[in-house]
Amino acid sequence: MIPHDSIVALATPSGAGAIAVIRISGQDAITIGNSVFKSIKNKDLTTQKTHTLHLGHIMDASKTLDEVLVSIFKGPNSYTGENTIEISCHGSPYIQQQIIQLLLRKGCRMADPGEFTLRAFLNGKLDLSQAEAVADLISSDNEASHQIAMQQMRGGFSNEIAKLREELLNFASLIELELDFAEEDVEFADRTQFHELLNRIEFVLKRLIDSFAVGNVIKNGIPVAIVGEPNVGKSTLLNALLNEERAIVSEIAGTTRDTIEDELVIGGIGFRFIDTAGIRETEDVVESIGIRKTFEKIEQAQVVLYLFDSLKFKVQSSEYIIEIEKIKNQFPLKPLLVVINKLDLLSENEITAIQQELSNLNIKLIFLSAKQKIGVDELKNQLLSFVNTGALRNNETIITNTRHYDSLLKALDEITKVKFGLETNLSSDLMALDIKEALYQFGTITGQVSNDELLGNIFANFCIGK
């Protein structure tokens, strides 16, 4: 059921600001807005053209609440597909609340989270994956996540899925037709073409599923654990990366007793750096807890940055190589980046000697000086190389939504069953069941198949005014 009542909400962040925007959408939105608006030129909002601006005052009976600018968007040519007005008022929280309360008394109700976008979906202005991209766009905090959200809002992902679904639906119709003529033993669906289609669908689904690994880290940031012995410069390196004094730096070993986290955008990709407690043998109870947390953070991280003091490495290289191998063996799937700090204290021959000693470990190695900020840019570039940004640069579709990922996995499973059925001459009626399930999974992505519970879960994560 598409609702027709009028809803209202603050579309800008709550709190004081230069201006605030109050949005009303619904069948009577313009009429309700007109009932509280007095134009400086005595205009009637109900007779004005769509996509026009009007200056005037919001009036509560004879009391003037604020001087405002009202924007009119008549359905279906609006974001929600229904009549919409936006009131730009001064950003005082008192003024915002006075206007909203007045509109509630005039017949509006408060919008639920995401209800404006829900109405856009119900009125055919957006499909479901595009609607979800709206929330991703609002929460994007770096260039890459913004680019992916914009691509999905423009319908890149939807169009790809819709095309596959349409082709599969055409063959499904032919299979169903064969069932109607089962006694005559005829084939309307060309099995060779059908097999080619299934191979193409399988290829696209696998590519989209594989893209989730990249999309997920772009959306949520890449956690990087900075580990090493106490006093090797972990906190100094974190400060150098962030270009601010984020972590306490001291000559006293064991200063960092808990993890410190902060984020940095490198090349449009978000990285979340975790400065951990130094790894060493200790009887200090608090420090021991911090060291235990260090290994927990290594477990959670996607990249491990193992930092060493250059002077200590010269004399203890054999011991440290064993420690590096332990980390490699304990976390074999995590990229390991070994960083030798205090580069300025090493000669060229000493640098070459360390490189030779570590050459058989098959690891990435960087020399830098965190204190003097030498080599920090090289480190950033190396971290960026761990992220496969090729698909992003080529503007390919990248999946970031867990719900889409789950539906794609299920669709791929059904397509695999259909292929097996085709190759083993499975009866058309059984094969038709698997095709229907694949079509269903495609439909859940774009919203061609949806239910109230699904929509409720999706739009509950939106902000109120969107």
Image (cartoon, rainbow, N blue to C red):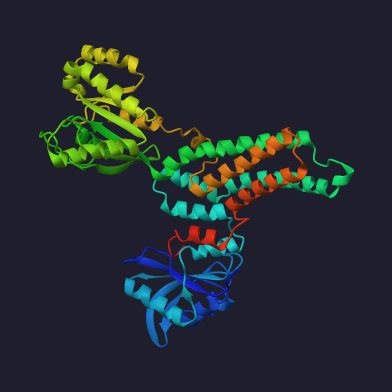
Asked whether 67 or 152 is in front, the reply is 152
Q: Where in the figure is residue 109, as x and y percent of width and height?
A: 47, 75
Q: Where in the figure is residue 328, as x and y percent of width and height?
A: 33, 25
Q: Is residue 310 above or below residue 45?
A: above
Q: Residue furthest bottom?
A: 62
Task: Say which residue appears at 46% left-offset and 51% top-offset.
Answer: 136
What is the tally of numbered marks visible in this picture? 0
Q: Is residue 316 above or below residue 26?
A: above
Asked whether 214 or 199 is in front, the reply is 199
Q: Is residue 393 above or below residue 311?
A: below
Asked whether 258 or 416 is in front, the reply is 416
Asked whether 94 or 115 is in front, the reply is 115
Location of residue 95 (image quadrant):
bottom left
Q: Is residue 44 above or below residue 175?
A: below
Left or right: residue 305 versus residue 414 is left
Q: Where in the figure is residue 307, as x and y percent of width and height?
A: 24, 28
Task: Say which residue appears at 42% left-offset and 40% top-offset.
Answer: 217
Q: Where in the figure is residue 175, as x and y percent of width and height?
A: 78, 45
Location of residue 89 (image quadrant):
bottom left
Left or right: residue 239 versus residue 299 is left
Left or right: residue 91 versus residue 429 is left
Task: Say which residue appears at 40% left-offset and 31% top-offset.
Answer: 386
Residue 338 seen: yes
Residue 366 seen: no
Q: Residue furthest left?
A: 252
Q: Quadrant of the N terminus?
A: bottom right
Location of residue 288 (image quadrant):
top left
